[in-house]
Image (cartoon, rainbow, N blue to C red):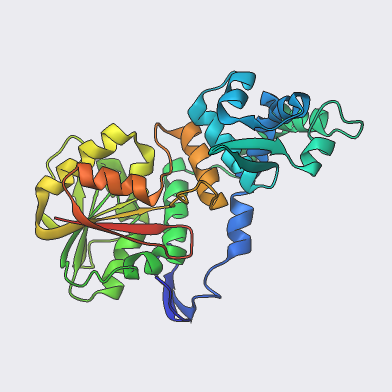
């Protein structure tokens, strides 16, 4: 949703300090780039280790997705995501020939990322990937050890402090007074909702251990408008509500599991209510954005899911019974898709 500069409210993970600033100053692009730098490095490492650039160089012509996947002996799905991310990183060029996308090396990739080049960096890249990268995985433990769940929840908290207001204002959510945030984790997005919409209440629906940690470190029950419900949203019944928020949830799951969850949400949803899906949306033509392309590779490593286009989320929502699907891009990492019952 395009709009001019506005004020946004960012809360520290403890919830004790409120900072008011302009939306431009509140979006630390450089810091986010640093945070996700390892995604870029590992994308480069993987493409080199699989021989993507060598294959394209030896072919002496652009290759299709199917040809690259066969040449590096990898799945079509994984290869497509890898090539998309390499394209976004300007390591590959894409062309369209007879309606088919074909890939070729950029000049820099030909010079520095092929083993046949006299100034190749591939040996250094292999060593960085197989040795140095693995050692750096333990850097935090070497400095100071913390509970993994708290660290993850602090990450989620900080992301929604930056992007949360844009997410909850992409659509006017004021008609929805009873909201359930499924997998709401640290409660940062729930806090953004109640700050923005004074009439709403938000219940964080999450696993018992997550609720316990949230209460201890992030959100208390003192705020009557933010509460908790312990449960597994796949296994347990969902209380009825006006709106259900699924933020960074569906990208963890296959289409089949996503439809299963969305159908369950649809049945619990009150008439006239809806579901708000918050995810990093891919462009329909596969051209980006780079952040979503890298996140999709991350899903390949960590989960059974993937990042999707707006059309793909619309199809999932429609298959689950939702209608009047609307999409709003925030201009930041996460976008929103609203479906109504």
Q: Position of residue 226 (x, y in %)?
A: 23, 63
Residue 116 vs 196, above or below: the answer is above
Nearer to us in this view, 62 or 240? 62
Name the residue located 69 percent from the left edge and 47 percent from the top edge: 90
Toward which corner of the image does residue 230 lie, by quadrant? top left
Residue closest to the far left: 271
Left or right of 191, for residue 2:
right
Name the residue located 30 percent from the left edge and 73 percent from the top edge: 195
Toward which corner of the image does residue 3 lie, by quadrant? bottom left
Toward which corner of the image does residue 217 lie, by quadrant? bottom left
Left or right of 339, for residue 146:
right
Nearer to us in this view, 71 or 11? 71
Q: Is residue 133 visible?
A: yes
Q: Number of marks in the image?
A: 0
Question: Which quadrant does the N terminus fall into?
Answer: bottom left
Nearer to us in this view, 51 or 130? 51
Residue 341 vs 67, above or below: the answer is below
Q: Position of residue 245 (x, y in %)?
A: 26, 55
Question: Which quadrant does the C terminus fall into?
Answer: bottom left
Name the residue located 80 percent from the left edge and 36 percent from the top edge: 110
Q: Position of residue 157 (x, y in %)?
A: 42, 58
Q: Is residue 135 visible?
A: no
Residue 123 vs 96, above or below: the answer is above
Name the residue located 64 percent from the left edge and 54 percent from the top edge: 34
Q: Position of residue 319 (x, y in %)?
A: 21, 41
Residue closest to the far right: 118
């Amino acid at each position: 949703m395009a709009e001019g500069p506005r004020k946004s409210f960012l809360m520290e993970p403890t919830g004790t300090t409120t900072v008011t600033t302009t939306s431009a100053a509140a979006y630390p692009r450089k810091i986010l780039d640093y945070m996700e730098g390892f995604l870029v490095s590992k994308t480069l490492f993987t493409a080199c280790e699989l021989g993507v650039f060598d294959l394209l160089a030896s072919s002496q012509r652009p290759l299709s997705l199917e040809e690259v996947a066969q040449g590096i002996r990898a799945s079509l799905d994984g290869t497509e995501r890898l090539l998309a991310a390499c394209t976004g990183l300007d390591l590959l060029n894409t062309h369209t020939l007879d309606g088919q996308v074909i890939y070729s090396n950029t000049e820099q990739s030909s010079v520095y990322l092929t083993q046949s080049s006299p100034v190749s960096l591939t040996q250094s890249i292999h060593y960085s990937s197989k040795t140095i990268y693995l050692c750096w995985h333990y850097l935090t433990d070497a400095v100071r050890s913390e509970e993994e769940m708290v660290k993850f929840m602090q990450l989620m908290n900080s992301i929604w402090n930056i992007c949360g207001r844009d997410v909850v204002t992409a659509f006017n959510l004021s008609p929805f007074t009873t909201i359930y945030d499924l997998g709401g984790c640290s409660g940062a997005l729930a806090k953004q909702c109640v700050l923005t919409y004074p009439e709403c209440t938000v219940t964080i629906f999450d696993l018992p251990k997550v609720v316990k940690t949230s209460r201890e470190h992030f959100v208390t029950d003192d705020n009557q408008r933010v509460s908790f419900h312990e449960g597994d949203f796949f296994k347990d019944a969902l209380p009825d509500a006006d709106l259900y928020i699924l933020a960074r949830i569906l990208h963890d799951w296959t289409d089949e599991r996503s439809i299963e969850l969305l159908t369950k949400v649809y049945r619990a949803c009150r008439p006239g209510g809806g579901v708000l899906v918050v995810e990093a949306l891919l462009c329909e033509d596969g051209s980006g954005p780079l952040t979503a392309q890298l996140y999709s590779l991350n899903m390949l490593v960590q989960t059974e899911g993937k990042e999707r286009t707006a059309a793909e989320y619309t199809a999932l929502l429609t298959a689950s019974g939702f209608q009047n699907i609307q999409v709003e891009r925030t201009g930041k990492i996460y976008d929103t898709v609203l479906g109504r019952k």
